[in-house]
Amino acid sequence: MSQTTNAQPLLAARALRFTRNDDPVFGPLDLHVDAGEALLVQGGNGVGKTTLLRVLAGLLRADEGTIEIDGRPAGHEERSRFIAYLGHLPALKQDLGALENLHVLCGLHGRRTRQMPGDALAIVGLAGHEDALVRQLSAGQKKRLSLARMWLSPAPVWLLDEPYANLDLDGINLVNRMISAHLRSGGAALVTTHGAYAAPPVRNRTFTLGRADAAEAAA
């Protein structure tokens, strides 16, 4: 896994603003996340949490502001190397098996040293489902397969949009263990959450959209 070797945040945004059909969605806002910490992006429905992560991932273009990754402007190459994104949709091939999906994604995006797709399936509780077609999996199993993809990614910055959705208590604990291990390895995570029932037990700060554009330390 890539790690930063200086004091720069792994990911930083300054004066970031996004509008849709001339209506403001968020911003201007400033945020950053350092190696070894999680930033919890909170706020009610419709305040722009998903949109913010999609802008940071490069899937949407901001109207104003700058984004830096490890101290450098966030171009396509930097995003492809440093950012892994988990959205609401699983981003999996429905007619491929679970293990085959992971092999394809590792071929496209690389994988962490000493981590193999079969081991990742076991970590997320999908051992025995290697040949199951994605379209045959439940919503919770698809989320677990997406988490296996994140675990294999060599990117140090994880953007996790409601990672606890569709998961039971064991799945929620799995997400927390994965985030904790990722941060111990020098990575960072931005996690959108309603803040109602789950948050990773790691060093974190909160960033509330829709009320204030400043991150505050969380106890």
Image: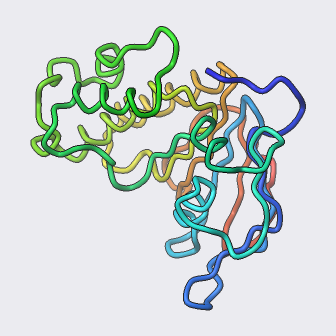
**What residue appears at the point 26 percent right and 33 percent down from the top-left corner?**
101
Q: Residue furthest top?
A: 114
> How many numbered circles are shown?
0
Taking the spot 21% from the left edge, 18% from the top edge, the residue there is 127
Closer to us: 143 or 82: 82
Quarter holding the N terminus is top right
Q: Is residue 160 above or below residue 98?
A: below
Task: Locate residue 83, reporting x and y percent.
Answer: 59, 41
Give x and y (percent) for residue 66: 79, 61
On the rendered structure, is 30 left or right of 155?
right
**Depth order, front residue of 218/130:** 130
Asked if residue 194 is positioned above or below residue 127 in the image, the reply reads: below
Q: Locate residue 70, reporting x and y percent.
A: 78, 38
Q: Quadrant of the C terminus?
A: top right
> Is 117 left or right of 99, judged from the image as shown?
right
Residue 204 sits in which quadrant? top right
Residue occupying the far right of the picture: 7
Q: Tell which of 68 and 192 is nearer to you.
A: 68
- Residue drawn at x 57%, y 37% is 200
Q: Position of residue 140 (x, y in %)?
A: 26, 42
The structure's colour scheme is rainbow
Point 29% across, 15% down: residue: 118
- Single out the residue that lies furthest toward the bottom: 22
